[in-house]
Amino acid sequence: MSTSGAALNFDSSMPRAYSDSWREAYGQTADTPRFSSYQSPDGNPVRFVFDSISLGGGQNVDTAEYPYGFWSNTQLGEKAHTVKLKGHLIGENYIKERSEIIAALQVATDDDSPATLDLPLWGRFKVVVQTWNVDEDKSGTGSCDLSIDFVRAGYSDTQRSEAATGNLTDVNVGGAVSNLKKAAVSAFASAVEKSKDISMLAQGFSKISEKLAAIVGRVQGAARIMNDMTNKINGITNLIAQGIRSPKELAQAFISACFGIVAGIMEIKNAAAETASYFMDGDNDDESSGAQNEGTVSEQFTRRNERNAMMNFLTAANYTLNEEAVTEQQLNTKTAMENLYKTAAFGAASQLLSRLDSDTETYGSQSGLWKLLEKLEGAISKEDSAVFAAVEECRIACAEALLSQNYDKELTRNIRKEMPLLALSLYLGCDAERIRTLNSVSDSFLIKGDIVYV
């Protein structure tokens, strides 16, 4: 069985045996029978006579018990395979062979440096040694019994780290957010269907719809785009007004509205950039000057759109519905809706953060926003394995997007005597335009005091 994920590709299936015929597997049809052997990492195979094997496995099941005598079981994955092996050594040189196999078993093993077990009926597979025993009896002169406990080699921390690092360049924020949307809706529907309160469901979605409407209220853009965002939010309240109380349908409408805001903000930004680019292509000095102002104004309000929305989403870490939950069903419904909002806000904030222009941001500002994103991630309940994986994938993708951009670290220098901007720019090695942006000065000023630069 193969388990796959963004940073995981592990196959737990057993190896093929040497033959489907036990006689052929043991080598009874050949001149030389096939022995069993144990090979330590970077060592040579040490042979022994196989007596018996006990292979253990199973499934990790999370069983939750509820009042009034019912329970639920959630599949979490496969347990590690254990191998309990018994064999013996016999013959004139068994003392030498006993010393060799003990020396091999004493070599440390782990997932990165596993040993190899070779059994006629099972084939070859990687193992990690847990315990071993050598038993001798004076009546069994010239022989000893072996008892060894193994666990099958797994997917090591090193492999998982390398896989995650290798996948950073492959995972994009859009794809990660798409997975997050599906996981959030599915987890909400599963959690609420078990124990839901219809009244709390309607009131809660009305309240979180108001949060989205407040975010849209701070956005500036074309009427068509603003109407699209508002209509998606109204879609939630329309479902409630129609008496629809399906948790999945309501959650899907909410997710659509939430990420509709992000899409609208990006559309406004792109439209402003295209307009500025069109006017800046002119050769006329007056036109170029006007375009410069046009571009600056467009940049300012699109930056405000992104920042206002992103800060609203990032504050979801402390969000709670101000509805009183009396019954268990009400509390369960309220908690699930709060987590849905936080999960969606995390995805939306990740998208907006990864798309901020590096030319208008600094190391300090990005560092502060990243800390808020981590705080929001910590506030999300990730008991659902799909939500856990999707949030992790989203954070990794956002981190990679930020690392690929060139954000400068802010520095401060105290200028004791007044200095012209151009001379200061050459002295600090920082572009004059960036100094003006960071310190709110103009070319006509002589600059003095604490100056922030990058």
Image (cartoon, helix red, strand yellow):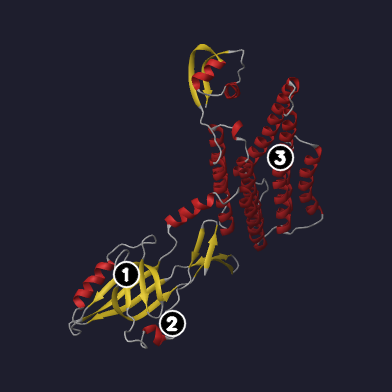
Mark 1 closeness class: few <14, some 14–19, many ≥20 residues within 10 Å = many
Give residue 160's position: percent from left, percent from top.
Answer: 47, 56
**For residue 57, which numbered disc appears in the image?**
none
Q: Earlier in the sequence, mark 3 or mark 1?
A: 1
Mark 3 closeness class: few <14, some 14–19, many ≥20 residues within 10 Å = many
Give residue 77's position: percent from left, percent from top.
Answer: 52, 66
Front disc: 2 or 3? 2
Contact check, label 2 and label 3, Cβ < 8 Å? no
Residue at the (76%, 46%) spot, across then down: 233
Question: What residue would you read off at disc 2?
Answer: 19
**How far, Cα to Cα, is label 3 from label 1?**
61 Å
**How far, Cα to Cα, is label 1 from label 2?**
21 Å
Q: Secondary structure at mark 1?
A: strand
Front disc: 3 or 1? 1
Question: What residue would you read off at disc 1?
Answer: 39
Q: Earlier in the sequence, mark 1 or mark 2?
A: 2
Front disc: 1 or 2? 2
Using the rendered image of the protein, determine whether residue 61 is visible from the camera's viewpoint: no
Q: Amino acid at mark 2?
A: Ser
**For residue 265, which numbered disc appears in the image?**
3
Looking at the rendering, which quadrant does residue 185 occupy?
Answer: bottom right
